[in-house]
Amino acid sequence: MSATPVRHAPRVAACAALAGVFAALPVAAQDFPQRPLRVMVGFSAGSVVDVSARVISERLSEALKQTIVVDNRPSAGGIIAGEMVARATPDGHTLLSVSASHAIGPAVTAKLPYNVVKDFAGITTTVNVASVLVTSAANGPKTVKELIALARAKPGSLNFSSGGIASSTHFVAELFNSMAGIQATHVPFKGIPEALTAVASGTVNYTMTPMPNALPQVSGGKVQALGVTVEKRVSQLPEVPTISEAGLAGFRYDTWFGLLAPAATPRPIVDRLNREVVGVLNQPAVRERFRGLGADPIPMPAADFDRFVAQQVDRFMKLAKQANITPE
């Protein structure tokens, strides 16, 4: 009778050890999500980083069977939202919707309260959009060459708006100014909609704004599009030339968006979120909705997004150096 437990002892011990491994896993990794999720957005409602988060969250909520709250915390370059997520409990319930400005941060901001690479775990890139150089439809320059000529004739007399210091809209405008050899005063706002409104009203001379924000204002006759930042003309504004062909040869800038989690988020949760978000982005209705806004879905594996962000940081550091853009 006593032989049976001895003969099965290794099997019992193995089972006990395996049970211990599963017990040691974070509860969230076994049963995620356990409560509503929060997606932090460092810019005002209506910006692409906000709109993309809301479009994705609507379908992601259905997939995860949990409520998802989009929380806007407008600040300089999205830093406040970034810091909140970097310090959040790494259990997958707090995410950060970002644009290229996340990787631009180290190039234009002297002291960030977090490391843009080490303090976050990539979920996936979401969409890519072109930006548009716009001026007031009422009294602004009508072409890229005219804007550059006006700025060169009166150095420092023109101003440009952005969605915030260290934002992608700030960086692309500074890059344009540097390549064009012009000087202009930066007027930062809490978000892209506000920056665009300032141009439409004539209080600011020009801005670089993502396509989804530009289209309604251009079609409504409030602003005029002088050029797009990408390599080829876009189908939504076929009559608008690229900035390169309009007078500033070699100019190109693409803006990407994505989702991040705190760095220590368990890999099973990161992988689950990646699968679900990529699934949402591949839904025909979602892809069509984004393309109608001038955005192209560009999902990628989580590990690839981590490497992509690191590469983008290096790229923007080099671009900033070439353009003589110094951290503020």
Image (cartoon, grey):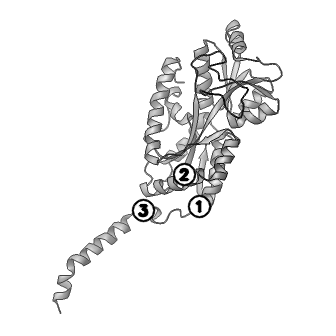
Displayed quadrant of residue 218:
top right
Residue 62: x %, y % from top left: 62, 61
CA gap between label 3 and label 2 equals 24 Å
Is residue 237 at least partly visible in the picture? yes
Q: Is residue 200 left or right of residue 189?
A: right
Is residue 190 at least partly visible in the picture? no
**Residue at the spot x=44%, y=33% of the render?**
311
Mark number for residue 63?
A: 1
**Residue at the spot x=53%, y=18% of the render?**
323
User: The N terminus is located in which quarter?
Assistant: bottom left
Which three-letter amino acid code belongs to the residue tagged 2? Val
CA gap between label 1 and label 3 equals 22 Å
How dense is the environment of label 3, judged by Cα within 10 Å: few (below 14), some, or many (20 and up)?
Answer: few
Q: Is residue 176 left or right of residue 326?
A: right
How dense is the environment of label 1, judged by Cα within 10 Å: few (below 14), some, or many (20 and up)?
Answer: few
The mark lying in front, picked from 3 and 2, is 2
Residue of label 3:
26
Residue of label 2:
278
Height in image: 228 above or below 121? above
Which three-letter amino acid code belongs to the residue tagged 3? Pro
**Residue at the spot x=44%, y=29% of the render?**
314
